[in-house]
Image: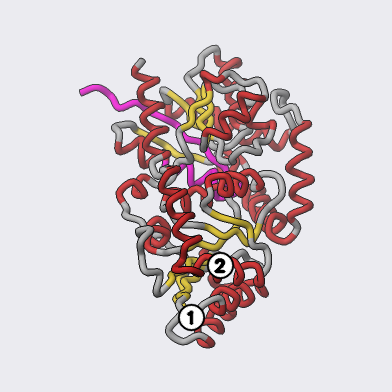
């Protein structure tokens, strides 16, 4: 029996999009007959510092988004092809160890810095394997991704591909695979566009900002009597639970609370609307589930393109305040939910629910060739 192709998938804990793309791509590759390993060289090489930086990333992007925008845009001027600070040599050494141990036939990176590490490791070792870089942002792409020494870029949509080509990158090396959402999305049936919308099920992903849970929750519930709200607290369950419970008690029979869950694809597919931040994973999962989305929090820089994509498709909008959320929901439900049905049709026409499967197929076909 032929040995299964080994594919190393490397990710980083700085933003859920990187990890989500890596996990989902591994599921698709494993199902297609590959042997995968998902690893975080930063976590392996500097576990304590990575945990601290990951906490700091969540704090700054949630509470100080303009500060993060400055940090993000400043990286456009960085030259990652040169060996950096000594602390970054630890993840690079960890990555070299992963390559030596696993001996992959290809490497897939969902984080922009790793291809630079790989280039130096390959040059020092006198060997190399194909490198596939999965870009987890849309349209507004940081220069760290664009300058990465990679064989292929796998991107989320045609607009992102066109943007990259316009910046001088080779069209033949940019593959519009779609964001690697969980393969289960391809098997799920979304809420149909002709649904009665009564009750109107809203799925809400709050940030860690304590006051906004109650404000957003009340605004959504007050938009229409037909609204039924599911609040997914996630990793913030202890921090947010008391406020969320107050909403549940104030609107009896209309609120459901969920902590951390693996059932996000099923939840998105069974709800009429999702409300959350403009992270790459959440936006593309909403697109995959054909679930219209209202964005309540936007990190300037990397998430602006995600909102732009959603608006271009016609599948969502920005609603930064509780008042805006309430108006938007009321508008979606007016005239027998006419505006909501238009969004549903737009998402159906976009038809992106199998990005991980498409990406896995491309990687394996390239290795066969």
- Secondary element at tag 2: helix
- Check disc 2: other Cα within 10 Å, few if <14, some if 14-19, many if 20+: some
Q: Residue at horizontal 29%, vertical 32%?
A: 33
Residue at the front extreme, as displayed: 335
Give the labeled residue for mark 2: 331
Residue 3 position, x and y percent, is: 28, 24
The reply, left or right, for residue 325 in relation to residue 74 is left
Observer-nearest of 18 and 305: 305
Q: Which residue is mark 1?
A: 225
Q: Is residue 57 left or right of residue 110?
A: right
Q: Callout 1 environment at 10 Å: few (<14), some (14 to 19), or many (20+)?
A: few
Relative to 62, does residue 100 appear above or below in the rendering? above
**Label disc, if present, on residue 313 of the rendered structure:** none
Q: Residue at x 51, y 17 (%)?
A: 128
* Residue at 72% in and 56% down: 60
The residue closer to the viewer here, 30 or 341, is: 341
**Magenta region:** 1-24
């Amino acid at each position: 029996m032929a040995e299964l192709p080994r594919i190393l998938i490397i990710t980083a804990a700085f933003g859920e999009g990187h990890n989500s793309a890596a996990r989902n791509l591994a599921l698709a590759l494993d199902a297609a007959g590959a042997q995968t390993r998902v690893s975080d060289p930063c976590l392996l090489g500097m576990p304590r510092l990575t945990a601290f930086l990951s906490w700091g990333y969540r704090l700054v992007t949630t509470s100080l988004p303009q500060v993060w925008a400055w940090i993000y845009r400043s990286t456009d001027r960085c030259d990652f092809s040169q060996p950096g600070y000594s602390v970054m040599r630890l993840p690079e050494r960890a990555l070299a160890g992963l390559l030596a141990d696993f001996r992959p036939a290809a490497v897939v990176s969902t984080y922009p810095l790793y291809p630079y590490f790989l280039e130096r490791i390959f040059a020092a070792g006198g060997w190399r394997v194909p490198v596939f870089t999965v870009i987890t942002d849309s349209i507004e792409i940081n220069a760290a991704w664009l300058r990465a020494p990679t064989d292929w870029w796998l991107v989320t949509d045609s607009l992102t591909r066109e943007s990259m080509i316009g910046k001088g990158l080779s069209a033949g090396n940019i593959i519009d695979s779609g964001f690697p959402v969980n393969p289960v999305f391809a098997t799920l049936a979304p809420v149909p566009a002709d649904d009665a919308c009564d009750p109107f099920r809203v799925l809400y992903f709050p940030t860690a900002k304590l006051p906004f849970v109650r404000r957003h929750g009340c605004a959504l519930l007050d938009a229409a009597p037909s609204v039924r709200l599911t609040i997914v607290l996630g990793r913030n369950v202890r921090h947010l639970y008391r406020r969320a419970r107050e909403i549940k008690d104030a609107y009896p029979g209309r609120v459901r609370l969920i902590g951390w869950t693996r059932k996000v694809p099923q939840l998105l597919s069974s709800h009429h609307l999702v409300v959350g931040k403009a992270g790459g994973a959440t936006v593309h999962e909403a697109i995959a589930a054909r679930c219209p989305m209202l964005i309540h929090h936007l990190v300037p820089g990397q998430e602006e393109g995600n909102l732009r994509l959603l608006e271009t498709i016609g599948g969502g909008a920005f609603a930064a305040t509780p008042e805006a959320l309430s108006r938007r929901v009321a508008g979606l439900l007016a005239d027998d939910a006419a505006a909501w049905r238009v969004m549903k049709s737009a998402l159906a026409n976009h038809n992106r629910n199998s990005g991980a499967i498409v990406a896995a197929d491309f990687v394996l076909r390239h290795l066969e060739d």
